[in-house]
Image (tube, grey):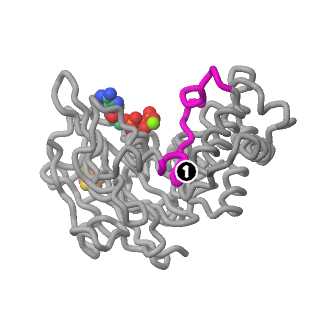
Amino acid sequence: MATNDDALLRVQDLHVEFKTRRGQALVLNGVDFEIRAGETLCVVGESGCGKSMTALALLRLIPSPPGRIREGRVLFQGEDLVQATDARMRQVRGNRISMIFQEPMTSLNPVFTVGDQIGESLQLHAGMNARQARERTIQMLRQVGIPAPERRVDDYPHQLSGGMRQRVMIAMALACRPDILIADEPTTALDVTVQAQIFDLLRELQREKGTAIMLITHDMGAVAEMADRVMVMYAGRVIEQGTTAQVLSEPGHPYTRGLIDCLPELGSSAAWDGDAREDLAEIAGVVPSIWELGTGCAFRERCPRAMARCAAEVPPMFAVEGEVAAGVPHGAACWLHAGAAGAIGAIGAIDAQGPRAKEAA
Ligand SMILES: Nc1ncnc2c1ncn2[C@@H]1O[C@H](COP(=O)(O)OP(=O)(O)OP(=O)(O)O)[C@@H](O)[C@H]1O
Ligand code: SF4
Ligand SMILES: [Mg+2]
């Protein structure tokens, strides 16, 4: 099992804000996590909780203005990408860290052929000439399961089906053998068979190249199937992290428990004490908007286990008692765990400055 030393990317105390007509909206409010070499980290949470913003912030793709990284660090092999120049970010993107976007048409250019688009990246980052890039592109298209790649390489994006476009995106994202692949809901728009094929493909490429994958998904079934570790986000914060077994079978945060209970086949109650489970079978209520957060735990209005303290203070990340997988701490930002081992701050990031309990602005 991976240890802290394998961290390829370490995100510390990341804050992203957007200027809106109502004022500054803090959409990421102190996000801490890491991605380790060769692993699949799944990021889950309801719509609007900050999953895509986190991914975009890593690659410095937050639309700016109106958005900006207000504070925090994104350490990629020790280098802080928040401080990197635009020229350096162009080298990193698509080359060392690449991204598959939810809607392929937003990142495929309609006026260039598939071959031009993948080939351009190979010429830019891998120093190939046009002929080498074309050959490598055909090889990549074959690898992602596109039939007759020698012909498809000259197709324009609109000539391909949704599933084929998604494969082209994956080929493009993997062309330069990135260290990290970020996949934001890569299969949401696709039918179940194609989804399964794409997950197989990601696993295969990961085995072959040792690429770390950050998979953003709403689908807890995909998490169970794909993830080594899971991080759960809620209202712009990471509220739980651990191995897939820790998070899915012994969730420490009532919100995670609620997400799992929405999926019948994963909804085992073995590790959950109390009567709260029934009440959460569908998580009642909605994620509070940034303007309604106020003080305390952002989940408290929906939480069947909320206590007085939950309204007063934002819970820091606490260690969750239970089986500890080697080197992988299980943490939940919930006062229910305050009695255990104490706050552990940024999970996994042992050099971080300790517990974080800052209040939303
Ligand atoms: N241009 C913007 N101005 C202000 N707030 C924004 C802007 N774009 C996004 N947000 C806010 O940022 C927050 C995080 O959004 P994000 O797209 O990261 O959510 P998500 O977890 O990816 O959701 P989904 O599952 O729906 O993709 C949301 O509350 C959203 O309203
Ligand atoms: S801190 Fe309190 S309100 Fe928040 S999830 Fe834990 S018990 Fe519920
Ligand atoms: Mg999103």
Query: If the image is split into quadrants, where does the N terminus sit?
Result: bottom right
Q: What span is colored magenta in the figure?
A: 91-112
Please rate how many residues cluster around mark 1, counting C-alpha atoms within 10 Å: few if below 14, some from 14 to 19, many from 20.
Answer: many
Q: How many marks?
A: 1
Question: Would residue 355 be visible to someone looking at this image?
Answer: yes
Question: Would residue 286 be visible to someone looking at this image?
Answer: no
Give the residue drawn at x 56%, y 30%: 103
Give the residue drawn at x 38%, y 66%: 78
Query: If the image is split into quadrants, where does the C terminus sit?
Result: top left
Give the residue drawn at x 18%, y 57%: 357
Asked if residue 24 is among those painted magenta in the image, a careful observer would answer no
Give the residue drawn at x 67%, y 39%: 119
- Which three-letter amino acid code belongs to the residue tagged 1? Asn
Using the image, determine if residue 272 lies above or below residue 166: below
Q: Is 110 on the left or on the right of 130, as rendered? A: left
What residue sits right under mark 1 in the picture?
Answer: 95
Queried on whether the Cβ of the residue with tag 1 lies below 8 angstroms from ligand 3, the answer reads no
Q: Position of residue 169 (x, y in %)?
A: 64, 38
- Between 154 and 277, the one lying in front of the other is 154
Using the image, determine if residue 150 lies above or below residue 276: above
Callout 1: SS: loop
Q: Position of residue 171 (x, y in %)?
A: 68, 43
